[in-house]
Every structure is written in structure tokens, then in C-alpha cells.
Image: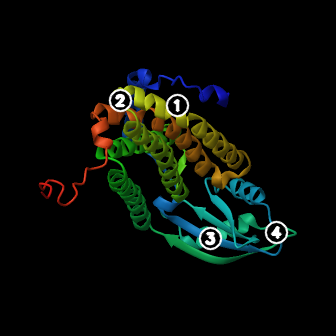
Amino acid sequence: MFEILRTREPIRFMTQAKPACAVSLVLIILCFVSLFTKGLNWGLDFTGGTVIEVEYAQSVELDDVRQHLEQAGLNGATVQNFGTSRDVLIRLAPQADVDVQQQGDSVLAAVQQANNPAEMTRLEFVGPAIGKELAEQGGLAILAALLCILVYVGLRFEWRLASGAVVALMHDVIITLGIFSWLQIEVDLTIVAALLTVIGYSLNDTIVVFDRVRESFRRVRDVSTVQIFNEAITDTLSRTLITSATTLVVVLALLLKGGVLIQGFATALLIGIGFGTYSSIYIASAWAMMLGVKREHMLPPQIEKEGADQDPLP
């Protein structure tokens, strides 16, 4: 297959740029509708709640702990190991008119096992104000990453390409959040980390394409901008497919075998990498072309040598 991709005849990707952008625009509108109507299903990292640390005498299976909590009517609890397989961290959503100590005692009684006694080592309540602050900081982190990328690509390449890269990254983040809102998948701090990872991954693909675009502009003349972008994307397509395929294998392994706690992280990566590959080919390039990027914008500035305009000596 990759021998076919190395053919001298470029694939005409840009002929499908307008339909692809139209599809993306519809998806973004649907995502905004879902975000404004259904909102995001914020996890305990952002909503606050009760944090309980339990230490068992022996190693314990997390699925057994979750089952005991559900049987006791404590649904929606987040259960994870920390430190060792004997230490379990349990987080519960905030409840009105519920004493924290009483809630901790109920959890400890629910997770006790006959042959593996448990002891509560930590009990505290995290207020919603701290969760709101974390949500704001997570949004600012994503915004700061996009601004830094805009500055970097603008200095490294050209402002039209830089804006195309940032538009493509925003496209990936909005669609990922929109799908999370539509499916009401819980959003916690790991999802913020996944979004930042998606931004870096998608940017890497875009930079590879733009670097080839700049080389092609400087190397050839009398070739249309559409032809340049088609050749650049075709030349880097095999690299893009290999990188995306190998990355998706790891992400699928995390999604299928990583457990409940990492499913949201893996899902965000799966969505983001898929749309990131697509946006690097169509959205970023189509935006730069819409802004009128040309060969003249890619040429290095001409530096006049000192004394070049002076008359030669007699």
C-alpha cells in the first residue's frame, strides 16, 4: 500500500477540502449545541466530594470494592489504587445534608471483607469551589497551549500557516468535548491531560505537512498552491498513516485493558487522534489556502550585502 502512496502522481486531497470543511462545520455546530444544552458530565475532580483512603491487610481487587459499594447503595464512586495494591482511594460525589464522618463510616463498613479487614487512613471533604478552580485552570492550560503554538508556528513558518494549525487544533478539542458531552462521559483531570496530548499529537502531524509545503514552495516555481499542498500531503501520507496506526494500537490497548479509571483518557485520545489526523490533512491546509498563502510568503527574506549598490572602483 505504501508503494502506491509514493507514486509521483499526487493525490488530489484539496479537491475535497470544501466538503470536508462543511462536514467539520456541521459537527462543530452539533458539538456546541450539545455543550450548551447537555453540558459536560464533570467528575469529582471538578465537582468536589468526599475523599476516603482505605488500607487493607492484603491485596484487594478494585472490582470487588466497587461491587461492595454498589450493594451498599453508594453508586457512582471512583475507586483506584494508590501506592500499593493494598491501598484504595475512594471518592464520592457531594451529597446534601450528609455528614462527612458518617459517610466515611458507611463506606468503611461497606468495603469490609471477612478475610481481608480494612482500615480508614484518610477522610476529607473537597468543596466545589476547589473543583471550579481546577476546571478554570484546565481551560486556561489548553488556551495557553494554543496561544504558544500560534506564536511558535508563526515564527517558525508563516502566520497563515500558524492560524491554520491553531484552527485545526481547536477543531479537534471542540469535537472531542462535544462527543464527551453527547455521550455524557465523565470529564476529570485525566481528560484535560488527554486533550493536551491530542493538541501535541495533532500539531506534530500539521508541522510535518507544513514543513513539506514550505520546501515545495521554495523548490519549484509556476505551480499552483493547490498542487503544492496535494504533493506535500501525499509525500507525508505514508508517515502519517504509520504513526497514526501504531498510536491507535496503543490507545486501543489502553481502552480495552486499561480498566475503568483510564477509559475516559483512552477514549479522548482515540477521538482526538482520529480527528487530529483528518484535520492535519484538510482543516489546517484548507484554512491556510483560504487566507491566500503563496510562494512569496515562504521565501526567505533577501539580505542586501553592504556596498552592493556602490559603483565599482575605476
Q: Quadrant of the C terminus?
A: bottom left
Label of residue 52 in the image: 3
Q: Which amino acid does label 3 sit on?
A: Ile
Up-down relation of residue 32 to residue 142 (above or below): above
Q: Residues within 10 Å of mark 2 (few under 14, many from 20)?
A: some
Name the element at disc 3.
strand
Name the element at disc 4.
loop
Tell me the distance, in whole angstroms, between the alpha carbons under discs 1 and 4. Answer: 53 Å
Residue at left 59%, top 42%? 270
Q: Which amino acid does label 4 sit on?
A: Ser
Name the element at disc 2.
helix
Tell me the distance, in whole angstroms, between the alpha carbons under discs 3 and 1. Answer: 54 Å
Q: Which amino acid does label 1 sit on?
A: Thr
Return the residue nearer the eye: 36 or 248.
248
Residue at left 74%, top 65%? 111
- Residue 214 at x, y = what percent? 40, 42
